[in-house]
Image (cartoon, rainbow, N blue to C red):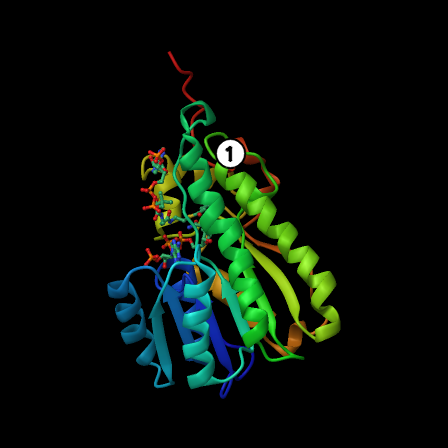
Amino acid sequence: MAHYDYAGTSVFVAGGTSGINLGIADAFARAGAKVAVMSRSTERVDAAVRQLSRHGRKTLGHAGDVRDIDQVRAAMQVAHDAHGPFDVLVSGAAGNFLCPALDLSPNGFKVVIDIDLIGTFHVMRAGFDFARRPGASFINISAPQSVSPAPMQVHVCAAKAGLDQIMRVLALEWGEHGVRVNSIMPGPIEGTEGLSRLLTETERPQFESRVPMRRVGQKEDVANMALFLGSPLASYVTGALIPVDGGVSLLGGRNYAGTPAPTPRD
Ligand code: HXC
Ligand code: NAP
């Protein structure tokens, strides 16, 4: 449920065409915002725009890859021209797969760094030029891997820890411009690509029994935090990594990942 009326505001969600990020985009649209989304697949962009439009607000989408800052800028220019300066900017594009470090190719490591870490810098840096200043709220989507090392996740742990340091440095540098920068750290979220890549349905009951709140999260749990961070209720919150994870990040990586120990190479 929205705690703030977002009517007239402009929201841009990078990677906002699926899963948690689409849930965030949907919550802002429902709360009255003009929402723009961007991701690689034109089909996904079109489907997301159809879904978001149902709330009756101005909505648009633009295909693009966060690994290319020119594509990020092009998508933002379209959104800025149609909806005005961004009041809220979300950077949520990410890639993940389980792979022991000994089996991970240099390119397999690099692809996740390129999307999650460098892509986040592109979105934040380009977004600054299109943001309402003062007043904008920038939100990165992190993961428990940022703070808890997890087997088979060396690429994701490095990328998410790095993007949270980007968040902290930008909070330091951009406070004087009236731009707040924070990260949300979702735990395992029901019905998402991310969770399905980390946990099988068979593993799930045992995993949930270890979660302090005894359940996986819902997309709405994450979206509600984004609504809070985007609003004046959070006007003194910047540089924060905020878990929305039912306490999962307190467990340490080997427990939350729901994964067996890495398989040694022959
Ligand atoms: C080992 C793999 C691999 C796998 C890809 N690679 N999948 N290595 N195990 N399962 C390697 C490839 O062999 C290749 O290296 C390199 O990675 C690049 O692969 P491409 O397929 O060419 O990359 P690309 O088409 O750009 O796709 C990116 C991707 C893909 C990350 C690999 O999975 C993707 O698009 N993912 C987006 C959706 C997603 O992952 N959603 C989950 C987000 S959840 P070589 O050496 O062969 O060239 C999340 C955290 C969740 O981020 C946390 C939950 C708690
Ligand atoms: P998802 O459904 O796979 O969503 C990823 C989104 O990013 C898609 O819209 C995808 O669309 C887009 N994307 C991927 N690569 C991109 C690129 N290079 N350029 C632009 N867009 C790109 O994933 P999810 O599970 O909901 O996860 C969403 C976010 O939450 C991620 O940041 C993830 O790390 C984080 N997270 C998830 C969980 C979980 O339980 N799922 C837990 C903790 C953190 P295209 O394919 O069209 O590009």
The residue at the point 51 percent across, 77 percent down is 2
Q: On the image, which quarter does residue 208 sit in?
A: top left
Type of amino acid at the residue the image marks with label 1: Val
The residue at the point 57 percent across, 64 percent down is 125
Task: Locate residue 196, reporting x and y percent.
Answer: 34, 44
In depth, the one of 73 and 177 nearer the eye is 73
Mark 1 beta carbon near ligand 1 (under 8 Å) = no
Question: Does the image show residue 210?
Answer: yes
Query: Is residue 231 found left or right of 236 in the rendered image?
Result: left
Mark 1, Cα crowd under 10 Å, few <14 / some 14-19 / many 20+, is: some
Query: Is residue 34 found left or right of 175 in the rendered image?
Result: left
Task: Locate residue 212, reporting x and y percent.
Answer: 55, 44
In depth, the one of 130 and 258 nearer the eye is 130
Task: Locate residue 106, reporting x and y percent.
Answer: 44, 32
Task: Locate residue 155, reporting x and y percent.
Answer: 49, 37
Q: Is residue 165 above or below residue 80?
A: above
Q: Mark 1 = which residue?
A: 154
Q: Residue pushed farthest front?
A: 70
Question: Does the image show residue 31?
Answer: no
